[in-house]
Image (cartoon, helix red, strand yellow):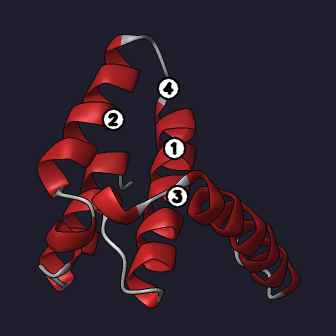
Amino acid sequence: MDNVYDYINDFYTNDDGWNMVIPRDDVETYIRKCAWQGMDDKALQKEWDNLSIFCIYLENDMLEMQDVTEEILVGCVIWACRYGDVRRNQGVP
């Protein structure tokens, strides 16, 4: 069974360019902090799912973290909700 760190490893190993969007070290530090606060692996995987969707959104708009404004974040949430609906309709968890 894969854990959240396996998914993060796969994501960043398959395309090192994601480090330019959100550095892997920052993601792993955040996930570790969540784990230390008591989140179980399922909750950690949900956090990672949200972060990976955020990465995809930023990359699609050719943005980096320092470019994110409140407006961009709102746009990301709207897009992520639509993206999540599409995934659910396709049977993707």
Q: Residue furthest top?
A: 37
Alpha carbon of mark 2 to alpha carbon of mark 3: how far? 11 Å
Q: Say whether residue 10 is left or right of residue 91.
A: left
Q: Please rate how many residues cluster around mark 3, counting C-alpha atoms within 10 Å: few if below 14, some from 14 to 19, many from 20.
A: some
SS category of the residue bearing label 4: loop
The residue positioned 53% from the left and 68% from the top of the image is 53
Quadrant placement of the C terminus: bottom right
Q: Amino acid at mark 2?
A: Ile
Q: Please rate how many residues cluster around mark 2, counting C-alpha atoms within 10 Å: few if below 14, some from 14 to 19, many from 20.
A: many
SS category of the residue bearing label 3: helix
Alpha carbon of mark 1 to alpha carbon of mark 2: how far? 8 Å
Foreground of the two, 17 or 66 = 66
Alpha carbon of mark 4 to alpha carbon of mark 1: how far? 11 Å
Q: Amino acid at mark 4?
A: Asp
- Numbered disc in front, either 4 or 2: 2
Q: Tell me which numbered mark, 1 or 2, is placed earlier along the sequence.
A: 2
Q: Amino acid at mark 3?
A: Asp
Q: Amino acid at mark 1?
A: Glu
Q: Say whether residue 60 is left or right of residue 32.
A: right
Question: Mark 3 = which residue?
Answer: 49
Q: Tell me which numbered mark, 4 or 2, is placed earlier along the sequence.
A: 2
Question: Mark 1 = which residue?
Answer: 47
Question: Mark 2 = which residue?
Answer: 31
Question: Mark 4 = which residue?
Answer: 40
Contact between labelled residues 1 and 3, with CB atoms less than 8 Å apart: yes
Alpha carbon of mark 4 to alpha carbon of mark 3: how far? 14 Å
> Is residue 46 depicted above or below 8 in this figure?
above
Contact between labelled residues 1 and 4, with CB atoms less than 8 Å apart: no
Quadrant placement of the N terminus: bottom left
> Is residue 32 depicted above or below 26 in this figure?
above
Alpha carbon of mark 4 to alpha carbon of mark 2: how far? 11 Å
Question: Looking at the picture, how far across and down is residue 54, in whole percent?
Answer: 49, 64
